[in-house]
Amino acid sequence: MAVPNTSVNGAGGNEAWDADDGSDPSKSREENARKPNIGQDLTNEEKKEVGGSGSGTPGGWEPQDEENARNQLTSNRANEISELFEYDNPRAGIQIGERTLLEMPNKGNAKVFSGASEVEVKQYFMELTGSKNLPEVRNIPGKGNIYTIKTPQGTFNLRDFSASSSETGSAWTIDIPRGIAKPNAPVEIKFLK
């Protein structure tokens, strides 16, 4: 509803003011623009209906929530790896999406898995390291490609080559620094291509 604006900056009312926009007609347009709150009179239910929430963010998801979720997932992945390499732990697999990949028999010290796509392997690597994105790939001449992420726990590598490829076959290999799975030794997990 448009009403005469008789009080803005003491000016008289030839200008129409839209009183339904949530602004205060006793303040200038500049003052109202500095503090826009078009949802000030909406209930939390009404805000949810139009895509907002009572906290002022869509779905109530704050920026730190994304980081907290990533940190929790990284912690879960580190625990998963630690349990996988514990001698007396019954864990025999890792969770990839909604599936559990079971460890394949292997003569070496690495844990070997089959059935993960390249996209799933890269996602697992990012979850393990707490990274939002893969770093730029580096090509190692005569060997293949490698992604490296440095964290407070050490340096993680994801590579598409392995010295043991004649035994295990072509595989993606994740190098995990000491202290994650074993206190004094780095470990590897492999995903057969």
Image (tube, helix red, strand yellow):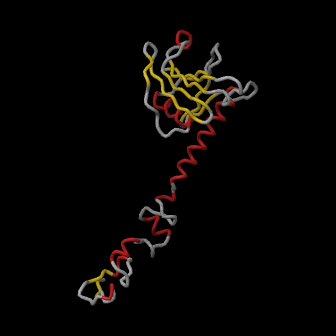
Residue at the image point whose x is 62% and y is 22% from the top = 111
Viewer-proximal residue among 111 and 26? 26
Residue at the image point whose x is 70% and y is 26% from the top = 182
Q: Image check: 85 left or right of 71?
A: right
Where residue 60 sits: x, y (%)? 51, 59
Image vertical order of residue 26 relative to residue 116, above or below: below
Q: Image check: 100 left or right of 159?
A: right
Viewer-proximal residue among 113 and 33? 33
Image vertical order of residue 76 relative to residue 164, above or below: below
Quadrant of image for the N terminus? bottom left
Q: Image check: 57 left or right of 180?
A: left
Give the farthest residue toward the top: 166
Where residue 140 sits: x, y (%)? 45, 18
Quadrant assignment, res 19: bottom left
Viewer-proximal residue among 76 and 96? 76
Residue at the image point whose x is 68% and y is 30% from the top = 179
Image vertical order of residue 160 relative to residue 71, above or below: above
* Count of picture labels: 0
Residue at the image point whose x is 43% and y is 61% from the top = 51
Image vertical order of residue 71 relative to residue 123, above or below: below
Where residue 127 sits: x, y (%)? 55, 37
Give the farthest residue toward the right: 88
Quadrant assignment, res 76: top right
Where residue 138 sits: x, y (%)? 44, 24
